Amino acid sequence: MTVKRSEYLPGVYIYARLQRKRESEESETAMRARARGRRGDTRGQRKERHMNLKREMARRGVELAPVAKAIRYEYPGFDIYLLSKVCNENRYGVRLLARARELACAAIGVPGRPDRRRLPCRVYCRLSRTQYARLQTAQRDQGYATMQDALADIIDAWLLAHGDTQEEARA
């Protein structure tokens, strides 16, 4: 099939115009970033919140395939192509779920963050709005600083009332 010159040129023109627009936007962004750098302003700069998988894999000499295989154990549709996109998250906008990140860290050999809470176990329930308001009022009236302190005392009293002989030392 032959393409007529008149049909071809508009597409080239539009592409060139979009390319110039993109370049001008990039140059404006770069100028703003340089100005922020001189002022010491960090607005708009993204802080790294998660471990960089690509950097850790390169540092430890781990390839994509074993990491993808470890994640595929729980997420069957995961493959090395998806892991490649995760490693370049700024380009593709793909991130791992928390559990998948844990699996990847274990496969790479990066130790996970330990749970340093003094009280690591959580107990919770749902209340109606009226029950919740009554509970908050009772907490304030009894002089508890936090709801956690009040509920811990309620649970300790309930356990003692129901024959629990093993009392845990609380700080």
Image: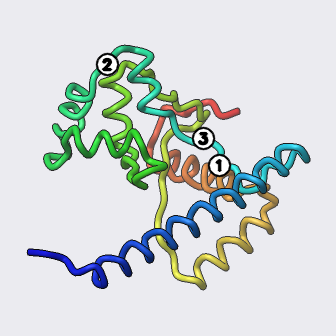
Give the percent coordinates (x, y) of residue 158: 52, 53
Give the percent coordinates (x, y) of residue 150: 67, 56
The residue under label 3 is 48
- The colouring scheme, among rainbow, by chain, secondary structure or one colour, is rainbow
What residue is at 84 percent from the left and 51 percent from the top? Answer: 35
Amino acid on which disc 2 is placed: Val
> Is residue 25 left or right of 74 when viewed as pictured?
right
Amino acid on which disc 1 is placed: Arg
How far is the residue under mark 1 from the one under mark 2?
A: 27 Å
Q: Secondary structure at mark 2?
A: loop
Amino acid on which disc 3 is placed: Glu
Q: Nearer the viewer, residue 28 or 33?
A: 28
Pointers 3 and 2 in contact (C-beta within 8 Å): no
Q: Secondary structure at mark 3?
A: loop
Q: Nearer the viewer, residue 33 or 121?
A: 33
The residue under label 1 is 46
What residue is at 26 percent from the left and 46 percent from the top? Answer: 82
Image quarter of the C terminus: top right
> Is residue 30 left or right of 140 when viewed as pictured?
left
Mark closer to the chain start, 3 or 2: 3
Question: What is the crowding at mark 3: few (fewer than 14 residues within 10 Å), some, or many (at least 20)?
Answer: few
Pointers 1 and 3 in contact (C-beta within 8 Å): yes
> Is residue 156 left or right of 52 when viewed as pictured?
right
Mark closer to the chain start, 1 or 2: 1
Question: What is the crowding at mark 1: few (fewer than 14 residues within 10 Å), some, or many (at least 20)?
Answer: few
Q: Residue furthest right?
A: 39
Q: Is residue 29 above or below residue 163?
A: below
What residue is at 59 percent from the left and 35 percent from the top? Answer: 117
